[in-house]
Image (cartoon, rainbow, N blue to C red):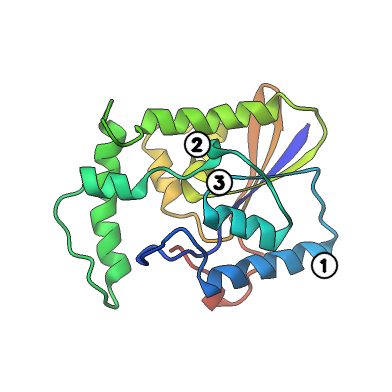
């Protein structure tokens, strides 16, 4: 039996001109995780990451240079917003995150219901590539400790698969995954089991705990 520790990337810059990078707080979250693991003597046999900058940055700050696979990348949030959401206004303000969530939730539901789209990866294709990446891990040697740095979407697919959740459970899980949180699994060639979800033992201060 092998273990898979999955870390969501640190806080990024979702409303920035370049959203695919960690914020100063996101970098701090990853460094705190590195210190936590070092203090506990945690080691891994393999380090994996998606190819998105925020995922790779978190990996490098928290543990070291990862092996990279596009299959661990996040779903196309911008494409979903532009193609499945009604007109919206996300001007800067204290309630920007709340406004975003009110727009994004129905857009995600519409995306999950769509069987095809000319420019946006479908829900089925997204889920399929994450499970394909999982299968590659399962096909490797047994009794190894793997760490993966990815995003909330792939974390949610893995949890949904482990608990055999219904399709809508993906969204309910996705909304709860915090930045730089730890979700742990055990896995073999034909099974994946959830051990812990969305844990933050390393982020003790409230200001370090963020969703977006």
Front one among 44 and 106? 44
Disc 1 to disc 3, C-alpha distance: 28 Å
Tell me whether circle 1 and circle 3 mark residues in contact (CB < 8 Å): no
Q: Is residue 63 above or below residue 184?
A: below
Percent of width and height locating residue 51: 55, 46
Q: Residue at x 31, y 35 (%)?
A: 112
- Mark 2 vs mark 1, CA separation in Å: 31 Å
Task: Name, please, the residue furthest toward the left.
Answer: 87
Relative to 65, is 4 above or below? above
- Residue 47 in percent (x, y) is at 72, 46
Q: Say whether disc 1 or disc 3 marks the residue closer to the N-terminus.
A: 1
Tell me the SS state at disc 3. loop
Q: Earlier in the sequence, mark 2 or mark 1?
A: 1
Q: Quick check: can you spot residue 17?
A: yes
Q: Which residue is mark 3?
A: 51
The disc placed on residue 39 is: 1
**Can you say which quadrant of the picture contains the N terminus?**
top right
Residue drawn at x 26%, y 30% as measured from the top left: 118
Give coordinates of residue 139: x percent, y percent.
Answer: 71, 23
Instruction: Left or right? Give the position of 99 relative to 67.
Output: left
Residue drawn at (30%, 58%), measured in percent from left and top?
Answer: 101
Q: Is residue 164 visible in this depiction of the protein?
A: no
Residue 182, percent from left and from top = 63, 54
Label 2: few (<14), some (14–19) or many (≥20) C-alpha neighbours in 10 Å: many
Outermost residue on the front side: it is: 17
- Which residue occupies the foreground of this view, 136 or 199? 136
Up-down relation of residue 155 to residue 32 (above or below): above
Which residue is depicted at the point 73% across and 57% down? 63
Q: Are marks 3 and 2 in contact (CB under 8 Å)?
A: no
Residue placed under numbered mark 2 in the picture = 160
In contact (CB < 8 Å): disc 2 and disc 1: no
Q: Could you say whether the residue bearing mark 2 is in a helix, strand or loop?
A: helix
């Amino acid at each position: 039996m092998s273990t898979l520790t999955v870390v969501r990337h640190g806080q990024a810059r979702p409303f920035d001109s370049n959203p695919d990078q960690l914020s100063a707080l996101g970098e701090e979250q990853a460094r705190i995780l590195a210190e936590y693991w070092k203090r506990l003597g945690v080691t891994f046999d393999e380090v994996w990451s998606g190819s998105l900058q925020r995922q790779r940055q978190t990996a490098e700050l928290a543990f070291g240079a990862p092996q990279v696979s596009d299959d661990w990348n996040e779903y196309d949030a911008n494409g979903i917003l532009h193609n499945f959401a009604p007109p919206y206004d996300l001007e800067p303000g204290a309630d920007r995150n709340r406004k975003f969530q009110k727009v994004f939730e129905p857009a995600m539901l519409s995306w999950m219901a769509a069987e095809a789209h000319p420019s946006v990866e479908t829900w089925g294709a997204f889920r399929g590539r994450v499970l394909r990446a999982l299968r590659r891990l399962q096909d490797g040697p047994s009794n190894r400790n793997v760490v993966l740095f990815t995003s909330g979407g792939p974390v949610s697919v893995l949890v949904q698969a482990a608990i055999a959740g219904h399709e809508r459970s993906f969204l309910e899980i996705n909304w709860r995954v915090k930045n730089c949180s730890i979700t742990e699994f055990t896995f073999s060639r034909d099974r994946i089991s959830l051990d812990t979800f969305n844990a933050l033992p390393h982020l003790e201060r409230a200001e370090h705990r963020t969703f977006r």
